[in-house]
Amino acid sequence: MPETPVFSTAAVAAPHTLAAETGQTVLAAGGNAIEAMVAMAATIAVVYPHMNGIGGDGFWLVREPNGRVHALDASGPAGALATIRRYRDKGYDAIPARGVDASLTVAGAVGGWELALELARALGGQMPLDLLLGDAIRHAREGYAVSGSEARFRTSEEAALYAVPGFAEAFLTEGKRTPAGTLRRVPRLADTLEHLTHTGLRDFYRGDVGREIASDLERAGAPITRRDLETYQARVTKPLELRLGGGTVYNLPPPTQGLTTLMILGMFERLGSFRAETPEHHHALIEASKRAFTIGDRIVADPLNMVHDAAAFLTASALEREAALIDMRRAAPYPLPRSPEGDTIWMGAIDKDGLAVSYIQSVFWAFGSGCVLPATGIHWHNRGAAFSLDPASRNRLEPGRKPFHTLNPPLAVFDDGRVLSFGTMGGETQPQILGQIFTRYANFGMGLADAVDAPRWLLDKGKGIAPALVRLEGRFDPGLVRGLSALGHEVSELTEPYIDNFGHAGMLVRHPRNGRVEATHDPRSDGGALGL
């Protein structure tokens, strides 16, 4: 059984060791958890490019020691030229996942860093930007070793990705995946980050960097204009919250699928008491996931175009109604309407004062659109692929609208004073993974490392109305597998004990009695937890 690292005063967790080291350094220099997270976000944007980058989006949950919770939405809208007519005229039936036509939304991550640092300063933070971005600049200029995850990670539409102009030169070696350990330098990205340390992060949108980004996007034929960048701002939003028996869990509202994650946890609590790691435990989570995904798929959209109030689905009566529709004796049929593909990083930080951060940053699919902007070295995300070209769709493409987001970084506060920052990558599957690691820790008392290490299942995409395929990592107890089959689940046992696409999860918890912080990150990733 893995042991959970315990730190005296503060800790960080990240899916890459270099990002964790950056966070630890900032905490040791007196920075707070928000400043540490901005620094980590910059480092991991360089060294984990298949999962994230400064050409992507981000979402923040921050809890002050006094209990106030802040939610920051750093996702970008569709560009002014991104219309259904434009894509129909180009012969598309759906928005492509790769190439310049997939680069159709503004990248919000850097705007989120700027907004988060405003909050950090309001809470006493004083770290200069050149120090926070210093590690990222150094790794980009001097080189970093390509990670094991990048080398082995597989994604669909790889041929289309590799064919995107500029992608092969930036990320491939002789036309193939770059082997793990290979030193990669990204000098243009280093120059971009260094420029931002002198001019400020808003230059990414309204200065020289923004001008170069807009020029490269225009030359490539992307539907994003200079004006789209100049007018972009990350925003403060009201977090969703769910009261459970032992505490409160927070998450981001739409356009994220934070609602889905909270609904899974709320329904699970109402389905009865189970022993850990039994067929009933996992059946309840699987069935709650089906119902939560069905509701999320129906209502979640750009928050300015929502028909329903997301919080209304988290009331006790709403959750009891949904839980009552779950049959604990039999699996329900279920189609998963969207591809579960999606690649992301989640990181957490808790400082000596108890300031806690849960942060997620992504380019959506592996390497995003594949478009590498030549002047800045930024690779742009493909989050706009979540839009629909159907004018009647809830998530229809329109200039200025935000697409559905798989990202959601939860945070929990227990009645005994513990504060838990947790999250995962995994695209569409994030709520399923979060339900598994949270219930293992909060409901069944597993240690953090055990909860994150334990084998996982994922609901796979169904075809029509049929039993969903439940894919399981190779370490589940055979009795549990037989029990799920007996309940009507179509199960597929995989041989690998740890699978990248089953999420890179992490958890940190601060104990109020002594201020110690337990922290862990996924053995499926290239990272870990560090602290003071």
Image (spheres, grey):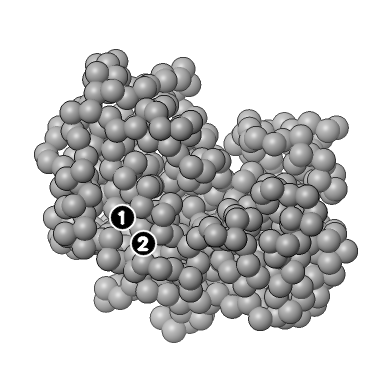
Front-most of residues 121 and 233: 233
Is residue 354 or residue 463 the one in the foreground? Answer: 463
Disc 1 vs disc 2: Cβ atoms closer than 8 Å? yes
Residue drawn 56% across the image and 66% down it? 402
Measured in 3D between alpha carbons, the distance from the residue under mark 1 to the one under mark 2, in whole angstroms, is: 7 Å
Which amino acid type is shown beneath numbered disc 1?
Leu
* Residue 275 coordinates in the image, percent (x, y): 15, 32
Residue 70, picture quadrant: bottom left
- Observer able to see residue 443: no
Instruction: Judge by depth and name the residue closer to the eye, 485 or 9.
Output: 485
Residue 207 image point, x, y percent: 76, 80
* Quadrant in which residue 272 is drawn: top left
Residue found 71% across the figure and 72% down from its top: 80
Q: Residue at x 53, y 58 (%)?
A: 393
Q: Say which residue label 1 marks.
A: 262
Q: Secondary structure at mark 2?
A: strand
Disc 2: which residue = 251
Q: Quadrant of the C terminus?
A: bottom left
Give the amino acid at mark 2: Asn
Indicate whether 265 appears above or below 161. below
- Tell me the quarter of the image containing the N terminus: top left
Q: Which mark is residue 298?
A: none
Q: Is residue 211 left or right of residue 59?
A: right
Q: Is residue 284 depicted above or below 380 in this figure?
A: above
Dot 2, how many residues are within 10 Å of its Cα: few (below 14), some (14-19), or many (20+)? many
The reply to whether residue 288 is in sight is yes
In the image as oriented, which residue stretches furthest toward the right? 219
Mark sitting earlier along the chain (1/2): 2
Q: Which element is circle 1 on?
A: helix
Q: Where's residue 427, x and y in %?
A: 51, 46
